[in-house]
Image (cartoon, rainbow, N blue to C red):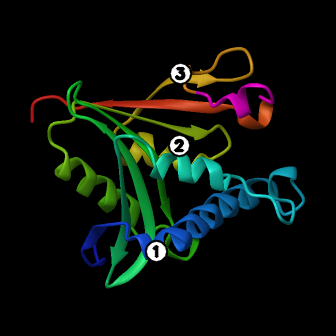
Amino acid sequence: MSGISTVLLQPLQPEDREQFILDNQWAFKYGAQQEFGMLDNRCEEGEEVISRATVERSIDGEHAETYRIVLDGQKVGGVVLQIDKESAKGELELLFVLPECHSKGIGQAAWKAVEAMHPEIRVWETITPYFEKRNIHFYVNRCGFHIVEFWNKYQHGPAVPEDMEENWSEDDEMFVFRKEIRNK
């Protein structure tokens, strides 16, 4: 991570909500295009890899905290957390860095800032699509998460929205990651 400036997490402002959603969708679409190419059905014109409804559901969650990742005054990504202080559990719902800013240590710096912001959280969880090799590398090798479950059409989590439940397909396969914080 040498050479990058300080990465800051700034609370999402209402006037930036629309751009946050669009930036998130672009980052997810870029990842799918890198893996599957432009012709994949996840990337057809007019469709998104992550729906607006999914992003909005995350931002508007009961215990949601939404931040812009800022580097040198520029918005370069974002993060949405669900924090349950009573159980000391946190869920990383969304974390994205704009594609033109990849491989600069920004995501790892943002994750360290999240952990520093929430020292009370003892267990973090997140999910990512099976095809997102960059994300799998990031969570396991850079952030210290462990893969604890593989969701597929036969086995998936209880929090799957009803609209996904009915149409679950191989394209929806996900890894579940967990990080337990010990001895802080």
Residue that numbered label 2 is attached to: 136
Q: Earlier in the sequence, mark 3 or mark 2?
A: 2
User: With 170 as the anchor, is 148 left or right in this view?
Assistant: left
The disc label shown at residue 149, or none:
3
Q: Quadrant of the N terminus?
A: bottom left
- The three-letter amino acid code for the residue at tag 2 is Ile
* Alpha carbons under labels 3 and 2: distance apart: 13 Å
Visible residue check, residue 162: yes
Q: CA distance from mark 1 to mark 3?
A: 34 Å
Please report the bounds of the magenta region as a residue range. Answer: 160-168
Which label sits on residue 16? 1
Instruction: Please provide percent x and percent y for residue 79.
Output: 41, 56
- How would you rate the neighbour count of disc 2 (Cα within 10 Å): few for under 14, some for 14-19, many for 20 or more? many
The image quadrant that residue 73 belongs to is: bottom left
- State whether residue 150 is above or below residue 56: above
Residue at 83% in and 65% down:
46
Mark 3 vs mark 2: in front: 3
Which residue is found at the position 63% from the left and 58% from the top? 28
